[in-house]
Every structure is written in structure tokens, then in C-alpha cells.
Amino acid sequence: MLQHLTALAAVVALNACPGAPSGDLTDPHTWGDYFLDKYEAERQVGELEPGPAPLPAPRAVLLITGVTIPAAWFDPIVARLERDGFAPVVYEPPDLLSGDLFENAAALARVVDRVKRDSGQDKIDILAECTGGLIARYYIQSLGGDASVRRMVTFISPQHGVAKAPLAADVAGWPALYDLSPGSDFLHAVNDRPLPAAVAFTSIYSCTDEYIQPYATSIIPGAKNIGLCDRFVGHFQFFYDPAIYRLMHRELIQPFAGDDPMAAPAPPPEDPTAPTTPGLADDGGGCSTGTGSSTGAALLMMAALTLATRRRTRPEPQ
């Protein structure tokens, strides 16, 4: 019965997504290139809108990409951060973060050390997309990263996993997808430890994200959680929307206990970029690996059908 339902869904997928990626669907770069091309126009950085007052001195901020997300996605955010006085460094993990997340968190420690050395700063900030926010959180909580990071802002990040990750893992075979499956050892390691007091944590998410559903998976207990829930906000929109960037900027300059003198003053409470949905914005309290939209589901089911067909047509071993 399940096979029949899967096949039916795949037929719908094939009709709904004639422009789905070609090539090896188990290669994360296939998906990375596909979405880069799909959103090429939105990603273009032209003349920027006026920004806030720049920082009094450059401050290093490490930008971390998620699963299947090439570094080029951060170009609009990098341009605005540089305009506003930051010194951004983009880190694209090996194999587009499709590998083991414990290992990627350990590798992140070396990247942070390099950014600190190059910037001459004892502590840096982190702005991490999707699964990048998970390896950053594990690094900070469990690998001593709280001594090197002042603020950790993550966005559209499935901090508690994605329900569809096991299916995607069976299709693609990426270790990261098994780690993003609810109940995995990695997710327990991330969520069973308290947040260190020395680091300010913020999670920004969309209630209408096409991939990270349910949106509550992005909520980090004890952190500042900002839900964009008063309008439709798409997954990839976080990279190029100026209003969402202003939210990120606000959190990166927000002062907190023990902060350094390089931090700029926080914007007033009536900041117009703040979400307005009661009970979801700042409530304090999944990465194109899950699916919440017809497009996401169609792409996943298309991949499943393609790989299942390949398996069925392989000759049986003699």
C-alpha cells in the first residue's frame, strides 16, 4: 500500500515539477546548483537601500551555510553586513554540510579559531542558516565554543529535526539527514544540554517556511525566538529580504550582560522590522531536507521515484 501511495505521489511530482534538477540526485551539489539557478534574480546584489549607522569598529561575524546551500547564497547578506561595519566571513562546510554533523561541528571549531586569529578578536559572532545553526550550537554548548562566540543568531533552522528527514536520508544517504531525523543522537546532544549564559542565542524562523515544518522545530528553549508569522515568508527569502536582514542586524548588535564596547547601541523597542504576531514573535520559548510545500514534496518524491527505479532495474547478483 505504501509503495502504491509513493508511486502516486511521485507521478504528481513529475507533473508538478518539470524543471526539477537533472543529474545525480544523491549529490548535494545538484540541489545546491538547482536552487541557486532558480533564485538567480532574487540573489542579485544591486544598489543597496540606506542602512543603519555602521559599527564604530569592524566586528567579525562568521556566516555558516546549511545543507545543500552554497556560499553564494550569503552574497546579499554579506553586502549589507559590510555596509554596516561588520567584517563577514562565509564558511561553506565540506560537501555542502551533507556529512556527519558531529564531525562538522568539530571542524567548525578550527574555522572559528582561524577567524579569531585573522581578525585579532577574542570573540566573534555567528550568523548561521538552517543546519549550520545546529553545528554552531553543538560547538558552542559541547566543544568549548562559548569561550569564542559572543552571539549566535540562526535562521530557518530545524533545531529539533525535520519529520521528513528519515525519508530524505533513505533517498540520498547523507549522514546529515540521519542526524536531522527526530530522536537522533546528534539532536539529543544538541537539545539535552543547557544554553551557556556567556552567549546570546537568537532563532529567527517563518511560520510559513516551505521546508522547515512544523515551525516549532526552530524554537530554542531559553533563547530569543522570533517568529515571522503575520504574512507569508518563504525559506529562501531570508537571504535577500532587506526587512529580514534588519532583524538579523538588530540581533547582532543587541547588547547583553558582559558585552564588549564595540557593540553598537540597540535599536528602540518600536523597531518597525520586528514581527507583529502576538504570542509568536520573540516568544522565548527544517535546509531543504523536509517538505512543507507541494514543491518540496514533489522534489523529494521525484528523487525517491528516480532512485527506486534505478534500484529495480539493476540486475540481480548471480
Image (spheres, helix red, strand yellow):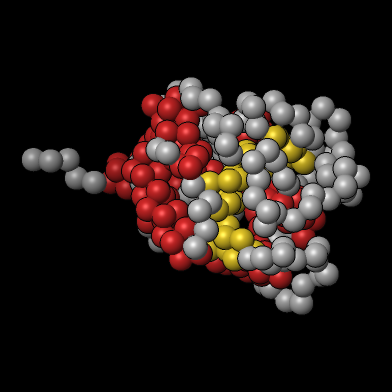
Question: Measuring 66% from the left and 69% from the top, which residue is drawn there?
Answer: 82
Quarter of the image for residue 200 reads top right
Could you say where residue 47 lies in the image, as x and y percent from the top left?
Answer: 76, 77
Q: Is residue 174 above or below residue 3?
A: below
Could you say where residue 157 lies in the image, as x and y percent from the top left?
Answer: 59, 41
Query: For this view, does 37 lie left or right of residue 21?
Result: right
Could you say where residue 99 lies in the image, as x and y percent from the top left?
Answer: 36, 46
For the residue pair 9 and 111, the one nearer the viewer reads as 111
Quarter of the image for residue 49 reads bottom right
Could you say where residue 129 lies in the image, as x and y percent from the top left?
Answer: 57, 49
Q: Is residue 115 above or below residue 251?
A: below
Q: Please give the count of numbered marks on the rendered protein.
A: 0
For the residue pair 300 and 164, the one nearer the viewer reads as 164
Question: Measuring 68% from the left and 38% from the top, which residue is drawn there?
Answer: 257
For the residue pair 80 and 86, the one nearer the viewer reads as 86
Quarter of the image for residue 203 reads top right
Question: Measuring 53% from the left and 51% from the top, which residue is drawn there?
Answer: 123
Query: For this view, does 238 lie left or right of residue 35?
Result: right
For the residue pair 132 and 21, the one nearer the viewer reads as 132
Question: Measuring 85% from the left and 35% from the top, which residue is drawn there?
Answer: 277
Res 299 visible = no
Question: Quadrant of the image for the C terminus?
Answer: top left
